[in-house]
Amino acid sequence: QVQLVESGGGLVQPGGSLRLSCAASLSIFAHCDGGWYRQAPGKQRELVALITTRGLTNYTASVQGRFIISRNNAKSTVYLQMNSLRPEDTAVYYCNAESIKPPMNYWGQGTQVTVSS
């Protein structure tokens, strides 16, 4: 059973930065797309950033230019560097690993990010 463990969340002031990490128990990120999702209270979970097995990246419009997703296949880890954080970035952030062939879809337990002064 694959486990994804997120870390790096916390409380930060507006304009600050945080770096989230997602470590997999097995070397799956070489074979899976890695994604970061977030869910704020009362809202649906949304995709924040995605990195494919080929290293292509995609971001939701609200974080474009502020967040950077990256991966280290040797460490089976995906990162999310979050800069210029805003109060509206406050949410629980979840890591996801997904592939179609073979079919795989794994989620982490989530890490809280709170942006407040």
Image (cartoon, helix red, strand yellow):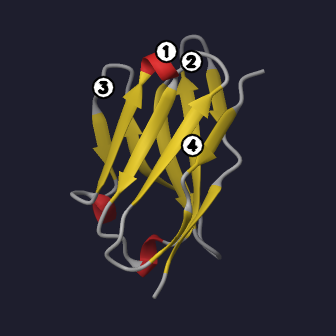
The amino acid beneath tag 1 is His
| Extreme-bottom residue of the structure | 117
> Which residue type carries mark 4?
Cys
- Callout 2 crowding tier (Cα within 10 Å): few <14, some 14–19, many ≥20: many
**Residue 77: % across, % down:** 50, 30
Decide which of tag 4 and tag 2 comes sooner along the chain: 2
SS type, badge 1: loop
Q: Position of residue 61 (x, y in %)?
A: 29, 60
Determine whether the residue tagged by mark 3 lies in a helix, strand or loop: loop
The x, y position of residue 45, in whole percent, is 58, 59
Which residue does the numbered mark 4 point to in the structure image?
95
Q: Which residue is mark 1?
A: 31
Q: Closer to the N terminus: mark 1 or mark 4?
A: 1
SS category of the residue bearing label 4: strand
Quarter location, residue 91? bottom right
CA gap, disc 2 to disc 1?
5 Å
Give the residue number, with chain letter if any, for mark 2.
28
Q: Quadrant of the N terminus?
A: top right
> Quick one: 9 or 56, which is closer to the camera?
9
